[in-house]
């Protein structure tokens, strides 16, 4: 059975506008297509995601729909642009909402995100990628995801205003990072599919 | 003329619900009342604040109304709860939206936030206050605010789940931090009111 | 063959003085002993670790000795106290020195830290644990370690001065975190021993 | 009487080797020379700075010598290179050692760093400057320094390996940031020299 990956694009722009982060995600998808990993990109700004940390905040909250996609996936890639050196507010909210399910368990009693793999992709005009990656990967790891090596793929330009990812097409460094992220999320998700983490010492 | 302070409460809860961060802000207000500083607390979750980094995102965006209050104030205090050790998504958005005005200038050609004082208050069940403070104060400083000494007042409990600020009433450490924050924002705002930063070497 | 774990204690104090971080590590070792994981705690402040990012800075540099232990281990746990909400300077240096080997490869051409598992433990009087954990786990992940779920075990007290870990003995939250860290580093290290990450798409 | 500025260069290299951070500091000094600010650059890697958080760790500790220069200065600029997106280990240690004096008071009973101005400069091949600036400026602010607007001057290159600051000479963005840092530290230090922060509500 094919592995499934879900990309949550935390751009501040809805899908009427071009997103550099989405361009980066598509470059990861090229590898997933070759590896037979099914994947889908969700533009979170297209949805009404309510403030709060309940699984369903109701009153039109569309997060539960997103959460179903995450539950169904083997790999979650959170992608964000950078503003003042920080991940976007929607990226922060994504972690808040995922955290809202952190006490839900799978059928073995582990947190429901166990045996899934997490990763982060970041684009920005300049500076901030590693800090955003550290925060996102930590958040995912803290709620149950496995973090493979080298799953912090990013492109940022030189200090100051300048061209964006789609204008530059990235560079050799970002291309290598994209490849490693795609392969290592695939490798670890395959391993966890074949050999889930034993439910010993880690149930809630 | 009295100094004005605006508190932006970045709780995820609207004002129907009690906010620990708001309780903390009220403890700062006690000092402001004694010092003759006029202050107001805004619960951002009560407003529709659009995603984006324009001054006015239109289509019902209520940020411009908040921005007017910030423009009119001498002191801005951003307050946030903690989720997974990070400031809230609304706090992240607050910095994004303020950043959207970072190229607007005052009548001397400096960034419009020059000669204002910035501060941060944080409440959480546990861990994360200093990291949130560092991020908020850096963001404010980067767009023009002056950061006085000791304006990172917080209360967090011991590691793990536990009582909140309003349940504990804080402790001697948080009370001293609240006092220092109130006095130092007052002192520096008074100085900047009397002696604004010369517009030499810092215009946009 | 038994799994091996190495603890690098980044306390600012040499082993003449009691270390809360070491006390925490010993509480992890209790589980390792039951699981049959061989482990050793190294107090880095006892060694002369030179500044720089070469594998061997020479002139008496004792890092190469530490590096051998890391190479030989299946699990690396970096432990740090907190100062002003940040990991210690030796913890920062530990990541710098590990990074100095990040272009060295194993016999399959992957970074030499591939197929090893990384984790972090943190003790402090108050606040800062998650930020330190995020930084340490990100650094380890970026150079090749796999980060299992829930391997950020910590104890911190309430905001302000107060008792240390050894004085309190931690709490239920820290005890559960210790257990999960021990079991999940064991589970993932076992999996990687049996099934190393394929060297496809991730060689240097 | 002329204002005094001290630069603490937290490069991992001693002064036998060229430091990009030092090159950046010299570009700040050009402005200080025009403004009549006396300044000195200290390469910390040339000194033996002991681990710990006492004012004097003894046994040859050379920090007390550095501390005297800080006490005597009106402006402190901490400068750091970047490793894995973080400030250097010496920069971390600099904050630890300054923190070791945080309970020492001036003759009015305020923390001894009150009425001094703090700033940060950062150079790196790529990514990490804002995160390092946020951490350094927060640390300084928490122990008593005033943080003027726009005192986080940095240069970093595009994502991945690439030329260093001295090889590129920076860019228009970094030049403007250097100018603003120089003028704003000068402006605020002048204000604080003329009008120190009243010792009301902020003594220890």
Image: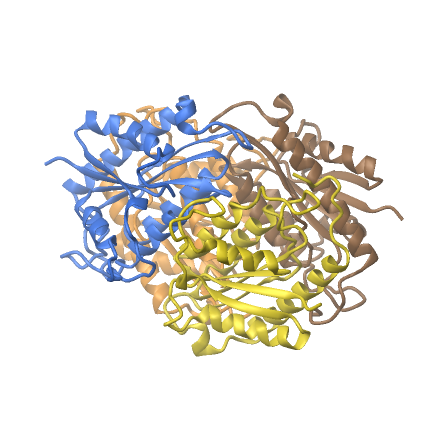
Chain colours: A yellow, B blue, C brown, D orange
Task: Tell me: B131 left or right of D150.
Answer: right
Q: Quadrant of residue A47?
A: bottom left
Residue C94 in sight here: yes
Name the quarter where the N terminus of chain B is drawn: top left
Task: Tell me: A121 left or right of D154.
Answer: right
Asked if residue B112 is positioned above or below residue B43 in the image, the reply reads: below
Q: Quadrant of residue C77?
A: top right
Task: Tell me: B139 left or right of C66.
Answer: left
Task: Tell me: B146 left or right of A24.
Answer: left
Q: Residue at x 57, y 36 (%)?
A: D61
Name the quarter where the C terminus of chain B is drawn: bottom left
The location of residue A27, given as percent across then percent down, is: 55, 74
Asked if residue A84 is positioned above or below residue B37 in the image, the reply reads: below
Asked if residue C87 is positioned above or below residue C140 in the image, the reply reads: above
Asked if residue D109 is positioned above or below residue A153 in the image, the reply reads: above
Q: Residue at x 46, y 73 (%)?
A: A165
Of A110 and A11, nearer the camera is A110
Residue C51 in sight here: no
Seen as rendered, the residue at the extreme left is B1
The location of residue B88, given as percent across then percent down, is: 41, 46
Of B35 and C8, nearer the camera is B35
Q: Residue at x 69, y 30 (%)?
A: C23
The location of residue D10, given as percent across then percent down, is: 51, 50
The location of residue D77, given as percent across then percent down, is: 40, 48
């Amino acid at each position: 059975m094919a592995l499934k990956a879900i990309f949550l694009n935390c751009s501040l722009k809805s899908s009427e506008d071009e997103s550099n982060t989405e361009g980066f995600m598509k470059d990861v998808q090229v590898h997933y297509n070759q590896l037979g990993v099914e994947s889908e990109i969700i533009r979170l700004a297209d949805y009404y995601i309510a403030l709060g940390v309940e699984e369903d905040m109701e009153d039109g909250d569309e997060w539960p729909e997103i959460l179903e996609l995450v539950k169904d996936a083997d790999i979650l890639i959170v992608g964000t642009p950078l503003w003042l050196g920080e991940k976007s507010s929607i990226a922060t909210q994504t972690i808040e909402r995922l955290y809202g399910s952190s006490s839900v368990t799978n059928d073995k009693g582990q947190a429901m995100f166990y045996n899934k793999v997490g990763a982060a992709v970041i684009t920005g005009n300049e500076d901030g990628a590693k800090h955003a990656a550290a925060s996102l990967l930590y958040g995912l790891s803290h709620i149950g995801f496995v973090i493979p090596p080298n799953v912090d793929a990013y492109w940022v330009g030189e200090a100051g205003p300048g061209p964006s990812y789609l204008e530059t097409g990235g560079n050799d460094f970002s291309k290598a990072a994209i490849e490693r992220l795609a392969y290592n999320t695939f490798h670890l998700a395959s391993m966890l599919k074949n050999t889930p983490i034993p439910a010993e010492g880690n149930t809630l």
